[in-house]
Image (cartoon, coloured by chain):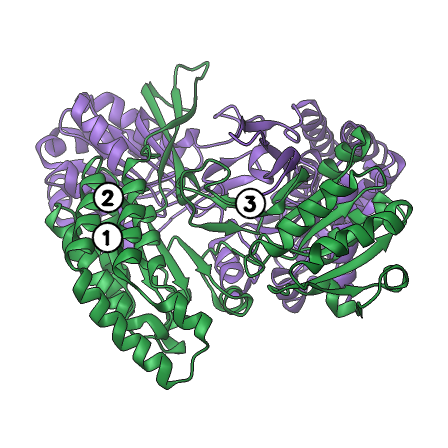
Chain colours: A green, B purple
Amino acid sequence: MTTMEIMGANAKAAARVLLTAGDLKNKALLAIADALIENCGAIIAANDIDIKLAKENNTRAALIDRLTLTPARIEGMADGVRQVAALPDPIGTVLSGSSRPNGLKIEKVRVPLGVVGIIFEARPNVTSDAAALCLKSGNAVILRGGKEAINSNKAIADIMRNAVEKAGLPKDCISLVEDTTRASSVELMQLSYLDVLIPRGSANLIKAVVENAKVPVIETGAGNCHVYVDDTADIDMAANIIFNAKTSRPSVCNAIETILVHKDIAEKALPAIKARLDEKNVVLRCCERSAAILEGVEPATEEDWYTEYGDYILAVKIVDTIDEAIAHIAKYSTGHSECIVTKDYASAQKFTDEVDSAAVYVNSSTRFTDGGEFGLGAEIGISTQKLHARGPMGLNELTSMKFIIRGNGQVR
Amino acid sequence: MTTMEIMGANAKAAARVLLTAGDLKNKALLAIADALIENCGAIIAANDIDIKLAKENNTRAALIDRLTLTPARIEGMADGVRQVAALPDPIGTVLSGSSRPNGLKIEKVRVPLGVVGIIFEARPNVTSDAAALCLKSGNAVILRGGKEAINSNKAIADIMRNAVEKAGLPKDCISLVEDTTRASSVELMQLSYLDVLIPRGSANLIKAVVENAKVPVIETGAGNCHVYVDDTADIDMAANIIFNAKTSRPSVCNAIETILVHKDIAEKALPAIKARLDEKNVVLRCCERSAAILEGVEPATEEDWYTEYGDYILAVKIVDTIDEAIAHIAKYSTGHSECIVTKDYASAQKFTDEVDSAAVYVNSSTRFTDGGEFGLGAEIGISTQKLHARGPMGLNELTSMKFIIRGNGQVR
């Protein structure tokens, strides 16, 4: 067996213990939170090595910032773990049940998935976040972070494994792949011990996972989101929502990349929208008709409609009808979050019925697509696929179910 | 674009129409049922070609029987479609909802998956069954049957496509891949237009799909199921359940393949169980200890614990404890259906808590793992994976969900 296969087998064995771990899971989570604080110095020492290497490799300042751990950030990680401990345990929830005519009593009960693989990039705080959510939902987790954070991740994972063991659960509830080569990444994507693989990171990472995985994958993250400004829209509201959805945090997946504006409101709305976006020097990439209305904008190409800029850039297109807007979204969107700004009842209904994305908004910012904002209590990622989970994923989305059937001798 | 890609794009377009098709879906289903009856002669003529070819190829009689369509069987197919039409429409169901502190109203609503690919073998009646379930749940479907039934499948698909169009929906709600080469099968498994791929058939087919697919797959079917006879079991009940679960239909996935018997009841129980199974000449493959109790049995090898016989063969193993039984199931089971026969409360609780299979039974036959028996109204297959769907899958399992968020200008 390879190192990875041994890790998989050990995780599977730990997952069996977790099936009935009950409140020991919370005990382990609180032990993790305490241990992170106690070992703050060791984590920062390991993190220093990563930062030193990153600087030697001329890594961008923004990336170094994401990589950097401070006592305050480690306190934040511990708080996050404590918050997960405080959430209700999803396992054992009876989802439905019935008595059949033959007397069989059938229940559908929430159970853990088993072994969850998480492949992520850069930010070392994902290590404790993801581990806490998996542990709480009764799953063993195999974590694989990026090579930039490997020393930090190793320190954090060691601390968590020891804390879990001290609390009375197997260490192997949490594992970290220490080999950060591409080969080890592909081996993890094909490890038959995994019940699900969740990639968290860039579009390239997710693409590589979908191409290589032989285990079920939940795709997360890619967000080419839209706001459609209907002909009846309140223009101030539209400008405000677009300003928020584009500029409050351009790098995240629920930020918008393209606005679609109805032709009958374009001449009034576009200058008002641009005036707001100018506050943050947003570059507009415009279709021919919108470019004719606005000054100081760039021309948009077909490529722009597909692009997730993650930056202070916004594509702009005038549409003749709401149907054209919906068709544009169907063609170019990644199915993450879309919004209509309208005063018209029928337009709102049509948009929410016909737009097939994870989150469809009326008169509100796409930036709300988030587990915390939706009241899930926590978030392991935002699914952009339709199978198993769609949109923000909380603890429930880290579970499966089974049927329990109780009889007294029934045969068929 | 290849023929397959064009089919995918057309299916995607049809799926958009189906999003809001409402009762037109039922109209189309009833039109399909009528058309199947009206065109019974044409279907049987096409089926005759398949049967002639099968006989020329010296196909097994059992397979030819599964392939054969008669007026009565076509009537049965039409009835099946009508039953699906009569089921409640799952689309639009509000699964949950809340008002957030900022006034946003969030609903989680059931929506179709989009485009479903189904790869199946031999039986041409699957063509109408699967198409009806997909259509009812608002999905476009791309069907790919085996080459043995290609003429029958073409006739049935043509009739369904025309009926769907007559009812006012796009033909491309239902498509059939007419190229039955292996290359076309692999192309379908990697067709990016698919939202999910469901293989229905042999273990080899399912393995090929999991190896080759680049779209999400729901694994179905493989069933290495167990009955564990606890030391407190009612021996008559145990023998009756084992007899039913092994012999009522040995070829199906919810039939059992191995029994595990507690050492303290083995000497009494095994002869009684064997006496029942002798009625159907079931071959027993026994571990050393059980072979010492029984006469006229074969020795079991390690391979037997993994085998889904699908035949009148049963593996037998004596275990020292319920824990050993649960560990055996964890190691060898495909996670389909398992049963404990017991009079002991704690044993029943332990078994249902710790056995991680889709259906876990107390004192009843594993043969009940079936959409109809579970009251789902219909069944597209039995999932043996943990993601999205587990156990018998009905209409709900052919759906996804989306969040609809209604606001009045909220920004984050």
Residue sitting at 42 percent across and 67 percent down? A121
Residue sitting at 81 percent across and 36 percent down? B40
**Residue that numbered label 1 is attached to:** A173
Comes first in the chain, label 2 or label 3: 2
Q: Quadrant of the N terminus of chain B?
A: bottom right
Q: Residue A334 appears in which quarter of the rendering?
A: bottom right
Q: Residue B235: x and y, percent?
A: 20, 24
> Which SS class for mark 2?
helix
Up the image or down, A99 lies above or below B284; here it is: above
Q: Are marks 1 and 2 on the same chain?
A: yes
**Residue that numbered label 3 is attached to:** A369
Amino acid found under the numbered disc labelled 1: Cys
Looking at the image, residue B13 sits to the left or right of residue B276; the answer is: right
Looking at the image, residue A20 sits to the left or right of residue B48; the answer is: left
Amino acid found under the numbered disc labelled 3: Thr
Up the image or down, B261 lies above or below A103; here it is: below
Residue sitting at 63 percent across and 29 percent down? B90
Q: Are marks 1 and 2 in contact (CB under 8 Å)?
A: yes
Up the image or down, A55 lies above or below B129; here it is: below
**Residue that numbered label 2 is attached to:** A18
* Residue B33 shows in this picture: yes
